[in-house]
Image: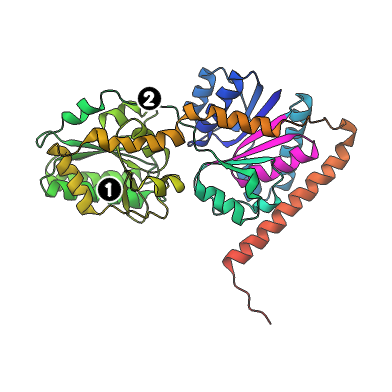
């Protein structure tokens, strides 16, 4: 069976998740082709290292936002030609609602089977899912599922499947924490883009570490990431270091491979994958959001954090500065039973590790590939073009309606 895996921009965790799906498809003998929007060379290399060639395409996100109707039609016709020429049987997209809308309609037009994978992040705008034509939708969290159902897509066709991360536990984690004392600094690590959308959480973390040191709790914070606000954060770090009298805030810049930094850390802060991975490696994780709320991952907070995909949205068990101060003191005084503490990590490992993905993913494939799909006769191109024009028009009409509904209130006459 021939499968086309089509992605949006090659950045963040979505293509890495797609890579885990592709590895399983290869293992089971599927013939795979991959299309994506060029963005990140490091992620490209991961695909190349797995022997997976990539065809790069236009960015659907930009095309739709800029109302490039002719380019959008050309994009869809090129995708159609690729599907027919290569005799694709199943299309899997990994991206947002735009990708699902257009590819699900194209798949229906060509009588192909289709699975849409909605990447994580804020799913409040899911492009009016009642208009999707997918056989199956896979999403990463309960929050994603609830939003998609609310927008009108049938709940029986949605599956929450978070397993997509391949990491190894640190077998020497007890020795790593045993080295902590009141003289040697405790290593904090924050991984984040340094831009307008993330700057509040970065500033809050720096402020927290400053207060810890002002209270004679020896902590060093390393920040991995880059972005438009790097200079601003660098200036703040230099000011704090000067006030404390030592370098407690260290900016690492962009880091392509984070594993060694995760292993070096004792406490890792962040959102999403940047904090899920180190938790799975047996590191203490703290989620921080842009409202400057912290939530220490443990057995009590696990369910809430998982439901919202560790995004920091709707934190129900907030950790105060006092709680984090106590955590640091207890680590330094060896008052935490780490074996017991890290037992709660199994909750996340079972829900995120790719070792638990295969059976569920193959079941989905079996469900949607039961019926044989047929190729449309190429002579029907004119009819298909008419349908594409209709779907494009429909997309913009209902998105204008959504925009007006969400941003303006109209009084009845």
Residue 372 x, y percent position in the rendering: 78, 29
* Residue that badge 1 annotates: 205
> In the image, what residue occupies the spot 68% across and 46% down?
101
Viewer-nearest residue: 76 or 342 = 342
Residue 7 x, y percent position in the rendering: 60, 35
354 horizontally vs 200: left or right: right
> In the image, what residue occupies the spot 26% across and 46% down?
235
Are the two marked residues, 1 and 2, in contact with CB atoms closer than 8 angstroms?
Answer: no
State whether residue 53 is above or below residue 214: above
State whether residue 87 is above or below residue 273: above
> In the image, what residue occupies the spot 54% across and 54% down?
124
Q: Quadrant of residue 52?
A: top right
Q: Is residue 80 magenta?
A: no
Q: Is residue 117 magenta?
A: yes
Question: From where the camera sits, is residue 370 visible?
Answer: yes
Residue 158 x, y percent position in the rendering: 61, 44
Q: Which class describes the residues within 10 Å of circle 2: few (<14), some (14-19), or many (20+)? A: few
Kindly state the secondary structure of the residue where label 2 is placed. Answer: loop
* Residue that badge 2 annotates: 168
Q: Which class describes the residues within 10 Å of circle 1: few (<14), some (14-19), or many (20+)? A: many
> In the image, what residue occupies the spot 45% across and 44% down?
309
**Where does the magenta region start and end?**
90-119
State whether residue 165 is above or below residue 30: below
The colour scheme of the drawn protein is: rainbow
Kindly state the secondary structure of the residue where label 1 is placed. Answer: helix
97 horizontally vs 333: left or right: right
Residue 358 x, y percent position in the rendering: 54, 27
Q: Quadrant of residue 94?
A: top right
Viewer-nearest residue: 198 or 304 = 304
Q: CA gap, disc 1 to disc 2?
A: 27 Å
Viewer-nearest residue: 405 or 389 = 405
């Amino acid at each position: 069976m021939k499968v086309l895996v089509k992605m949006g921009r090659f950045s963040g965790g979505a293509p890495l998740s797609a890579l885990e799906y592709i590895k399983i498809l290869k293992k089971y003998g599927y013939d795979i082709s991959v299309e994506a929007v060029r963005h990140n060379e490091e992620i490209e290399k991961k695909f190349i290292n797995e022997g997976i060639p990539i065809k790069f395409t236009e960015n659907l996100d930009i095309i739709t936002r800029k109302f490039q109707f002719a380019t959008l039609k050309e994009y869809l016709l090129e995708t159609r030609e690729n599907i027919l020429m290569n005799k694709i049987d199943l299309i899997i997209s990994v991206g947002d609602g735009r990708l699902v809308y257009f590819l699900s309609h194209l798949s229906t037009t060509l009588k192909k089977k289709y699975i849409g994978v909605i990447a994580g992040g804020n799913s409040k705008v899911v492009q009016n899912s009642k208009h999707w034509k997918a056989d199956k939708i896979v999403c990463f969290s309960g929050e994603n599922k609830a939003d998609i159902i609310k927008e009108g897509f049938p709940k029986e066709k949605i599956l929450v499947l978070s397993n997509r991360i391949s990491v190894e536990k640190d077998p020497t984690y007890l020795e790593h924490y045993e080295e902590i004392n009141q003289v040697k600094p405790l290593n904090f690590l924050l991984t984040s883009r340094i831009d307008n959308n993330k700057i509040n959480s970065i500033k809050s973390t720096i402020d927290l570490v400053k207060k810890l040191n002002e209270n004679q709790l020896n902590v060093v914070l390393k920040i991995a990431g880059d972005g438009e606000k790097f200079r601003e954060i660098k200036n703040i770090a230099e000011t704090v270091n000067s006030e404390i009298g030592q370098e407690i805030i260290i900016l690492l810049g962009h880091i392509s491979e984070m594993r060694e930094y995760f292993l070096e850390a004792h406490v890792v802060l962040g959102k999403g994958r940047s904090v899920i991975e180190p938790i799975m490696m047996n590191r203490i994780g703290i989620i921080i959001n842009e409202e400057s709320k912290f939530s220490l991952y443990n057995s009590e907070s696990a369910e809430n954090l998982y439901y919202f995909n560790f995004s920091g949205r709707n934190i129900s068990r907030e950790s105060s500065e006092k709680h984090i101060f106590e955590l640091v003191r207890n680590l330094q005084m060896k008052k935490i039973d780490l074996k017991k503490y890290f037992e709660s990590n199994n909750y996340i490992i079972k829900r995120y590790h790719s070792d638990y993905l295969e059976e569920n993913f193959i079941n989905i494939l079996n469900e949607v590939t039961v019926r044989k799909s047929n190729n449309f006769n190429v002579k029907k191109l004119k009819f298909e073009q008419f349908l594409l024009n209709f779907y494009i028009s429909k997309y913009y009409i209902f998105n204008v309606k959504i925009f007006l509904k969400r941003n303006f209130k109209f009084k009845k006459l």
